[in-house]
Amino acid sequence: MMVTDPVCMMEIRKEDVKFTSEYRGQTYYFESDHCRRVFEDNPDEYVGVIPEKVYGDHGRRFDGSE
């Protein structure tokens, strides 16, 4: 399964992911520790930028509205 890093938008294989972060009950996957730290500094900036098909339907939209 492929997942998308919400910071750099890089697609990575979920089984290869080394960096994750939990936010509002959702796990986010990152291709680097740098991207994980950027996300954790301001997660609301990145939540909602990934299509729902990647993380499941949690009411997120591309524009960040819920």
Image (cartoon, grey):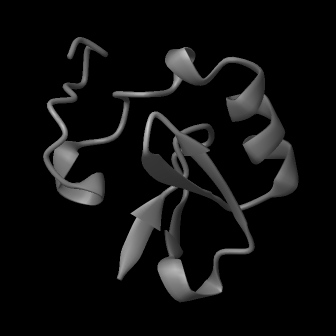
Residue 36, given in percent of the width and then of the height, sits at 75, 45
Q: Is residue 12 left or right of residue 58?
A: right
Residue 47 percent across, percent down from the top left: 43, 28
Look at 61% across and 37% down and name the residue there.
7
Q: Is residue 34 left or right of residue 22?
A: right
**In the depicted structure, whether residue 55 falls above or below residue 60:** below
* Residue 31 placement, left or right of 22: right
Compared with 6, 46 (above or below) is above
| Residue at image coords 24%, 42% | 51
- Residue reaching furthest bottom? 15
Residue 21, how many percent across, how many down? 65, 50
- Quarter of the image with the C terminus in it: top left
**Number of numbered discs:** 0
Identity of the residue drawn at 37% across and 30% down: 49
Residue 55 pos. (x, y %): 29, 54
Quarter-of-image position of residue 56: bottom left
Residue 64 sits above or below residue 34 on the image? above
Outermost residue to the front: 25
In the picture shown, does residue 37 fall above or below 9? Answer: above
Q: Residue at x 73, y 31 (%)?
A: 40
**Where's the N terminus, which quadrant?**
bottom left
Dividing the picture into quadrants, the one containing residue 25 is: top left
